[in-house]
Image: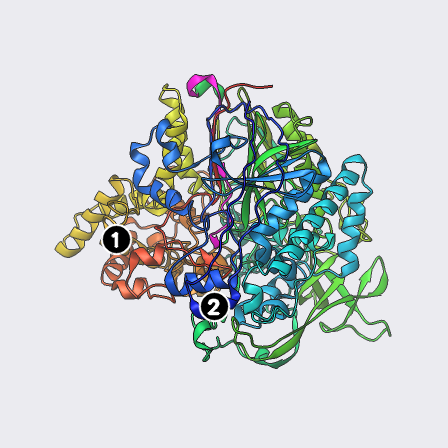
Amino acid sequence: MIRIRPSTRRTVSLVGALGCLAALLVAGPASAGADSPADSVTDYCQGHCNDILPPGENGNATLAQILLNRTLGLRPKHTDDQLGKYADLVNGYQQLTDDKLGSYFNDASLGVPGDQVASSISPRDDVTIVRDKATGVPHVYGTTRAGTEYGAGYAAAQDRLWLMDLFRHVGRGELTGFAGGAPGNRALEQQFWRQAPYTEQDLQDQVDRVANSGTRGAQAWQDVTDYVDGINAYIDKAYSSRTFPGEYDLTGHVDPITNAGGIDHFKPTDLVAIAAVIGALFGAGGGNEVTNALAKQAFDAKYGVAEGDARWQAFREQNDPEAVLTLHDGQKFPYGGAGAGAPSVAMPDPGSVTPEQLVYDPTGSAGSSAVSKAAVAPKKYRSVAGMYNHGVLPADLLDSPKHGMSNALVVSAAHAAGGHPVAVFGPQTGYFAPQLLMLEELEGPGISARGAAFAGLSFYVELGRGQDYSWSATSAGQDITDTYAVPLCNADGSPATKASQSYLFHGRCTAMQRLERDDAWSPTLADQTAAGSYKLVMYRTKYGLVQSRAMVDGKPVAFTSLRSSYQHEVDSIIGFQEFNDPDAIHSASDFQHAAADVNYTFNWFYVDSTDTAYFNSGDNPVRPSDVDFDLPVRAAQQYEWADFDPSDNTAAYTAFDAHPQSRNQDYYVSWNNKQALDYGTAQPGDGPVHRVNLLDDRVKALVDSGQKVTRADLTKAMEDAANADLRGEDVLPLALQVIETAPVTDPDLATVVDALKAWQQAGSHRVSARTGDKSYVDGDTIRIMDAWWPLLVSAEFRPGMGDSLYAAQAAALQINESPSGGQNGDTGGGTSVNEAQGHKGSSFQYGWWSYVHKDLRAVLGKPVSGGLGTTFCGGGDLAKCRTALLDSLQQAAAEPADQVYPGDDSCDAGDQWCADSIIQHPLGGITDPTIGWQNRPTFQQVVQYQSHR
């Protein structure tokens, strides 16, 4: 049993550091009054649970603190104290043992020992918020459930108020009016408005629907209400004491001298808006049907319909027989359409697809994409002038459904040391300062959990642990979004055109609903973009949101996107509530049924002291058997989802037993890969080479070794995969086999081949020699590999495919996803957001690795299951293939570093380590150091429970 003893929080004063700012410097958080009671909780992990969430828990800083950070490098406590631990693992993992895990992870035990209490406050008399010395994480203890949720809201606002405010405005398509009109802000709000536009009534309807959905729904509504009350209590306190985040001053919401202005209170619908953003980021899947159709048309044009369709299906990889699976014991969970020949398919007429206009009536700076240069500012503010001129959030945050995130490694009790399952798992949510997630512990009636939650949604722990179990998730991305070809019409009976604003629904010409958002902005100290405005307009039909228009069989249609979780982002609250309830979760089976109450597309993993479990969640619509939902569907009643009700976007969904699931498999791995046999993937990329191979190979070797797996063993496997180059490990050996079918006579080229071979045999790692080094071991060989990949792919496939087909398939699946975000070939730069993002850590999910792997095996005469239909490299001639590879390799070897890594705002051209490095994208005024590249979860748990309730 751990008992928390409240203590007094020290008052901090920022006086004298900058004399010119004396009027702005204010006292820190007030100390606690009388001691508050704290619950006792039993921790069945017994010191064997750890976690980490860089850069640090504290995500709020006053204006004075921001200026001190920008001018003197000083920073508020707990803003970066988890970053060093996280960064150092890449150079320390090979010597890792269980007793050294604390050097790289936090102690994630429940409660706070009395001598580790840094502060204790009671914002009202039924809750105490204790913060620990090590990380400043809030541990919220309520004597009532309402008090617990009030404290959760208060603590969230303490740590993430500015970030929460950003996301509630993103979720309404109002970011520019709140944070400024920078091109990045405009791009982000436009992307969101295209994916999930809502009216205020839409948001309220989601709240009301959950509140009226039974006992748990009513409790969720009360929890949210109390949580919002806690947020608003902190806003009032921080505003009156002038301890609110300084970004409000810098963006013009509060005057830094007079304190005139204010911070708007939160309301429950704000949380719906935030949930809509998170759902769009991590919990959707599908919606690529028009892109698929265009790729299929290109194959058909090249090879004819019958042969073209077969080859398109091979490249589509919907059920590739060589894909690595999370459920590897042969379980089958059929989920897929009727095929391209189904009567439901509505192929666009060639060349007829045009994207739907989104932006109307632009004025001022809205007509330019140029980034404003930092303008002159008063001397004391020069360090922050223009800090948001590019945008407060990444412009491409929501620009693609291909947000492959998160990994999991789980080993069953039968193969684990001590006979207790081991897990190393967590979400890859990107790198931000402050982080999108926050850590917390919640203890109160019906709630007992510690872990991470998205800022503004932390009324429950979303990923973490209970008293005797842990859980985590990876993005699953199965297809819950369909594209409908909706016939257009005019209400007056005149002939329809692609510009028509009415459509046929069940035989009746129906007006589209216009969803409009008026945005306007003016320059501020932080975002100096000149004044401007525009209207964002989306049209909504009963078949979803209009994304593009086209002709089908010579008649005009709107291609609409219908996602099963649209208008239902809040529904998942019930599942998360159950995860936090110790009375609801007693077993792996309990957890699986709770996960089924989450309508986002996630792969869920569970461990306790004896069992492991997996479950794939999401509202998978039941489609008619003659519908192929991999291509656009004709908008006709016979092709609608079963029991479809357009009034609230509900339908029949596949049953619990139809979702991929398992308990106590020898091990589980997931890195956003294919879940199970016959469970069709929503987009190409799941073939014989996928980044999950990096995990599967290592964990399988541990299990097959006969040695019992420890927490350190599994962590080492994760980290070894985290710094490996997938192309080097799985594809390069085949390319070298082709090259070495004859001697390499050019001595310079032979040296390059030998270097690649040595790097590959050493593990294909992208790692520095020691902590602090900012260059790679084998850096020049890695440069050549980076330069070679797009040249290799082009040399192998373009001659046989032709330019049009090659470009169409590259639009369906990007060629590369390197750590630097570069080296994308001549079809890159806009094909996919993922390939263009730098400094994001997550790498090697999307690329042509499987295509290259299958094709080179074919040219070498090796067996290939699910082949591409033809051999592309050298037209199937081994000698010609070898020449193509050598010529492209020679070209790559000659490519200078400043061309391979052209530089950006953070890195000089040619700086390889910096190009790959991870930057905590500053969402607020505090900045953090750059760290070396790792391909691993942002929030991560390492757990092994010792006993069970």
The x, y position of residue 487, in whole percent, is 76, 64
The x, y position of residue 840, in whole percent, is 44, 54
Reading the image, the residue beneath label 2 is 21
Which residues, given as a range, are shown in magenta? 416-433
Tell me if 42 is positioned left or right of 907 in this view.
right
Instruction: Answer yes or no: is residue 569 visible.
Output: no
Q: Is residue 563 above or below residue 110?
A: below
> The residue tagged with tag 1: helix, strand or loop?
loop
Tags 2 and 1 touching, CB below 8 Å = no
> Residue placed farthest to the bottom in the image?
364
Closest to the camera, between mark 2 and mark 1, is 2
**Residue shown at 64% from the left, 23% from the top:** 586
Q: Residues within 10 Å of mark 2 (few under 14, many from 20)?
A: some
The x, y position of residue 715, in whole percent, is 40, 33
Looking at the rendered structure, the kind of residue marked 1 is Ser
Q: Is residue 243 above or below residue 596?
A: below
- Determine if the magenta segment contains residue 432: yes
Looking at the rendered structure, the kind of residue marked 2 is Leu
Q: Residues within 10 Å of mark 1 (few under 14, many from 20)?
A: some
> The residue tagged with tag 2: helix, strand or loop?
helix
Instruction: Between residue 852 and residue 897, name the one nearer to us.
Output: 897
Tell me if 537 is positioned left or right of 751 in this view.
right
Reading the image, the residue beneath label 1 is 775
**Label 2 or label 1, whichever comes before in sequence order:** 2
User: Which quarter shows the N terminus?
Assistant: top right
